[in-house]
Image (cartoon, rainbow, N blue to C red):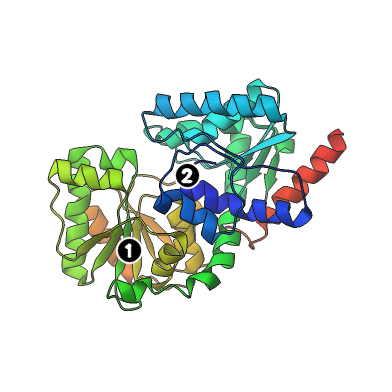
Amino acid sequence: MGTRPEIIKMAPIIWELEKLGEDFFILHSGQHYDYKMDRVFFEQLKLPEPKYNLRVGSGTHAEETGKTLIGVEKVLMKESPDVVLVEGDTNTVLAGALAAVKLHINVGHVEAGLRSHDKEMPEEINRIIVDHISDYLFAPTEEARENLLKEGIDDEKVYVTGNTIVDAVHQCIKLAEGSNIVDALGLKQNSFFLLTLHRQENVDIKDRLENIFRGLNLVVEELGLPMIYPCHPRTRKRIERFGIKLHDEIILTEPLDYLSFLKLEKEATMIFTDSGGVQEEACILKVPCVTIRSSTERPETVKVGANIVAGRSPEGILKAAKMMMSRTRSWPNPFGDGKAGKRIVYILRRELSLRG
């Protein structure tokens, strides 16, 4: 693992491995590396310390992938594990899977089969490659499974398990109730919007970022609620460098720990995001979501009515927000029953015992 979403989504698997007394270790690439983006998540999710931390930090795609690949290979040659689990679609996932498969070590891909069908997203490239070199593909939904079968992946390698994010949200939402973040920010329940925006294809292109914030400024102006934006340091630099104008009621904060963020999600009137994980969390928590992208690899959220893909034009963002404001929060959760971590560990134990 190497990023905040991977830590959260791997946590239910780690909890189950610990419960069963299995022999495992955590290898952390260090792709996210400061306290607020990393350390605090281990503490709040009560996870064991990583046995290895490569501390690769941020860089270009080649730098992150290359450094992680070199570091992971050394660890795997030393440890010789039966299987390497990777989760999601980051450069850490790509490097971890490549290092393992080249050493003839089994690879299990958690959250396999997601497709945005947009190769402008570097994550889409990572997903496709990792799915095609994995031995165990843990698809969160039937739709994800169908994506894999359409690409010619052997059905016997694919297991529909549900998404571990449901396990994590169910476990952590009780803990999040103790957070005072809503009061600390001077907010009232169901009287604010929540924003996350970090994807490279959104924040690195000046015209695109300007259009997005024009749309968000219109949302705040016309719908009359403040918008809280826990802002990644990298994105904050882009906003400052590009001279992006934000409405006075778009309030930037530092990145938040998981429990505080979960509390804000639960209490928000609506969530605006370009994050895949946040789309899922909003759906699970029954909070309307507007996705600021041209496509999503979580189409299940759109189908059940929890989410709308707004694009990046100011008019599209405002129109989507108005549509979701009137949406009844009665959709079903398409991501499973909160037992995905248990299923994944059960499948691995069974398959590895059969292989001897």
Mark closer to the chain start, 2 or 1: 2
Residue 347 visible in image: yes
Image height of 9 relative to 44, above or below: above
The residue under the point 46% across, 60% down is 258
Q: Is residue 320 left or right of residue 47?
A: left
Residue 298 visible in image: no
Q: Is residue 232 left or right of residue 278?
A: left
x, y percent for residue 218: 17, 61
Q: In which quadrant will I find the C terminus? A: top right
Q: In which quadrant will I find the N terminus? A: top right
Looking at the rendered structure, the kind of residue marked 2 is: Thr
The residue under the point 19% across, 47% down is 211
The answer to which of 36 and 315 lies nearer the viewer is 36
Q: In this view, does 179 lie to the left or right of 254?
A: right
x, y percent for residue 7: 53, 49
> Badge 1: few (under 14), some or many (20 or more) residues near its Cα, within 10 Å?
many
Looking at the rendered structure, the kind of residue marked 1 is: Leu
Image height of 29 relative to 302, above or below: above
x, y percent for residue 206: 18, 39
Q: Name the residue under label 1.
A: 194
> Badge 2: few (under 14), some or many (20 or more) residues near its Cα, within 10 Å?
many
Q: Mark 2 points at which residue?
A: 3
Total tally of numbered discs in the picture: 2
Image height of 258 relative to 205, above or below: below
Q: Quadrant of residue 112?
A: top right
Image height of 43 relative to 159, above or below: below
Measure the C-alpha gap from mark 2 to mark 1: 21 Å
